Image: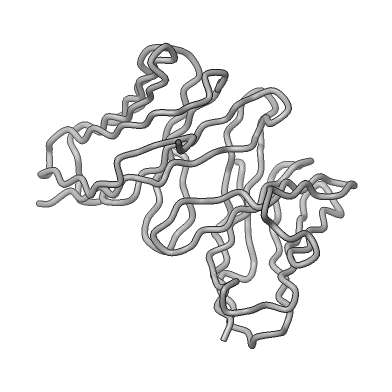
Amino acid sequence: QKEVEQNSGPLSVPEGAIASLNCTYSDRGSQSFFWYRQYSGKSPELIMSIYSNGDKEDGRFTAQLNKASQYVSLLIRDSQPSDSATYLCAVNAGGTSYGKLTFGQGTILTVHP
Amino acid sequence: GAVVSQHPSWVICKSGTSVKIECRSLDFQATTMFWYRQFPKQSLMLMATSNEGSKATYEQGVEKDKFLINHASLTLSTLTVTSAHPEDSSFYICSAKAFTNTGELFFGEGSRLTVL
């Protein structure tokens, strides 16, 4: 079983719609959760971090965390073509591994005009 | 803030040669940096944890004698791919933790290595 799993997609949504990206993780002791955006040929860019259960909103982005279900999601409202990228879910176990991230395989998002 | 710079951004070398990649934290001090590798259409895989002033910690399956890591100062870590082979061709990305109270990592621009 992979430690961090994402649906690889591709996920295609029309411009202006809500894109929903999902991620599950296997280590129940995980403490920190991140969403990174990666454009083709570029390095990842941090867009959201979440540490406690519930929702966290930042502009058009909302991260949702449910530790009981070991599930974290990212919602992108009013999707734009510029949001087309690969979205990586990353999890940190904390403790002695603080700072080490385990990445999912990424979900390719395409926003079409 | 929290800018990480990597150099070179791309490099082409012949098989058997060595290549050095530099990772610098520009506006903060990083006692720990992380080196990741990403093959095409795959996710990032952690190679090693670079600790300032001490030996790097390598992930299982990563050859420490092939991927030499030096973290000589609080703002610079280097990765040297020794005796590179075509299968080492990949996108190498360094990252650093800028804030002590969170686990956020900030990534360098990445270095694309092509070994002929």
x then y, percent, for residue A98: 67, 30
Q: In this orientation, does residue B26 appear?
A: no
Is residue A41 in view from this perspective? yes
Left or right: residue B73 compared with residue A19: right
Q: Where's residue A87, x and y in %?
A: 36, 44
Q: Residue at x 57, y 30 (%)?
A: A92
- The single residue placed furthest to the front in the displayed view is A1
Q: Front-most of B101 and B51? A: B51
At horizontal 35% and vertical 16% (from top left) the residue drawn is A55
Image: A84 above or below A18: below
As drawn, A55 above or below A48: above
Q: Residue at x 57, y 66 (%)?
A: B111
Q: For residue A41, which quarter of the picture? A: bottom left
Residue appearing at x 44%, y 15% in the figure: A67
Q: Based on the displayed image, in which of its 4 quarters is residue A63 positioned?
A: top left
The quarter of the rendered structure image containing the C terminus of chain B is bottom right
* Rendered location of residue A8, percent (x, y): 30, 46
- Left-right relation of B22 to A68: right
Q: Is residue A45 above or below residue A21?
A: below
Q: How many badges with numbers are in the image? A: 0
